[in-house]
Image (cartoon, helix red, strand yellow):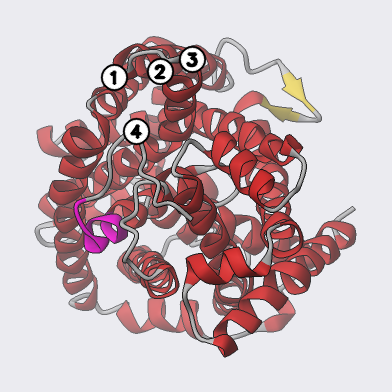
Amino acid sequence: MQEKTSSQGSWASRWVFIMAATGSAVGLGNIWKFPYITGENGGGAFVLVYLVCILLVGIPIMMAEVFIGRRGRKNPVDSLEDVAEESSQTKAWGLIGIVGMFTGIMIFSFYSIVAGWVLNYIKAMATGELAGLTSDQASATFKALLADPMTLLGWHTLFVVMTVFVVARGVNKGLEIATRIMMPALFILLLVLLGYAMSTKSFSAGWHFMFDFDFSKLSWGAVLVALGHSFFTLSLGMGTMMAYGSYMPKKASIGSTVLAIGALDTLVALVAGLCIFPVIFANGMDPAAGPGLMFMSLPVAFGQMPFGQLFGFLFFVLVGIAAWTSSISLMEPAVAFIVERMKVKRITASIGIGFIVWLLGIACLGSFNFMSNITLFGKNIFDFLDYATANIMLPLGGIFTALFAGWAVKSKFSAEELSISKLFFSYWKISVMVISPIAVAIVFVLNL
């Protein structure tokens, strides 16, 4: 087959692709969501199920998404259609890409609100506004932020603009430069915070909470949450890895590259938990505090510890960087599609998608104040989008990708693109054809 190249450009090296894809995967899901869902679902047993989901389901599907993107060298929709046509299949498989793009936009709309909370807390930590707060005062401060739509709108707008700025500059001048700067900064900050957590007297309590297994605390609902989060954190089911894969150098090994991304992403989630739980336990707080864990419990904890104000500031900067790298990847599939299909300039496409996200975000931030009475299936708009994307749309998108890669694409094409050992390829093939679809189907049925 003649070598294709993406019209959007390509990553300078395999390592840059690993950093970009890890930047996509490492985000609020690792640092905001993973610790609190671990707390809500019993700790170590949940972590073990999550790791199994990553290994058995997440990694094989990520490999499928990356190889489809690199073989097609286009946006997710066109790559799916071209790869399907090459295997004499219907172009209707491109619908996976369309649904994935909409899923990414839906996620970005509420993701931006949480990122806005983070930006607000970076400012508050820097100015000392949170110093010396009691638990009740910290809770009241966070609730006051949620009740203030204009402040939320300001931070939401700033975050969308930050993301549009990077995406509009393209693969090399935008995505790649941002990755080269932000990912090393993220890893350094994480290690600094881990060292800080290890200096606390409650580090062993945090360690045991995360790695001691008590399966009596597990429910099928927790298994669904673990499965959904494995898709959410690896950026699967939304076309991101197809878009990023289309910029991947041809000589780079997909198998080892995806394993490296999965390992880095999982490591960040685990280390984030080890940074947060010791601080929580040191101050006698509840690890199952839910979505507000990072915003109501941690400021109090940092405020009561030596150099807590500094490390609290660094922590929220870390979360802000992670949110920014992920939001870039949420926009990229839709922007690439508009640029390639509609022949629109990248800056125009970026602003257009950014505006749609901004509008949807207003409905999400309104969930906490002026639109709090509006519900969908018993949930406010923010919670509905979070639940629907993480627990339904992402797993289904990933599963259809697996079925496409396993059943529709000819084995000689997937083997050629993946270029892995026969044993590993056999495992991958069985996983995307059988294991992943059945695993998701069972969890879905048991949660009905």
Q: Which mark is residue 161?
A: 1
Residue located beneath label 2 in the image: 354
Cα separation, mark 3 vs mark 4, equals 13 Å
Residue drawn at (61%, 37%) of the image:
97
Q: Which mark is residue 226?
A: none
Q: Is residue 85 covered in magenta?
A: no
Cα separation, mark 2 vs mark 1, equals 8 Å
Labels 3 & 2 near each other (Cβ < 8 A) = no
Q: Amino acid at mark 2?
A: Gly
In the rendered image, the vertical position of residue 52 relative to residue 381, given as above or below: below
Counting from the top left corner in percent of width and height, residue 76 is at 54, 39
Residue mark closest to the camera, 1 vs 3: 3
Q: Earlier in the sequence, mark 2 or mark 1?
A: 1
Q: Earlier in the sequence, mark 3 or mark 2?
A: 3
Residue located beneath label 4 in the image: 7
Locate residue 384: give its quadrant.
top right
Cα separation, mark 3 vs mark 2, equals 17 Å
Residue located beneath label 3 in the image: 342
State which region is magenta: 12-19
Q: Amino acid at mark 3?
A: Met
Cα separation, mark 4 vs mark 2, equals 22 Å
Residue mark closest to the camera, 4 vs 2: 4
Residue 131 in view (yes/no): no
Counting from the top left corner in percent of width and height, residue 407 is at 76, 62
Residue 426 in view (yes/no): yes
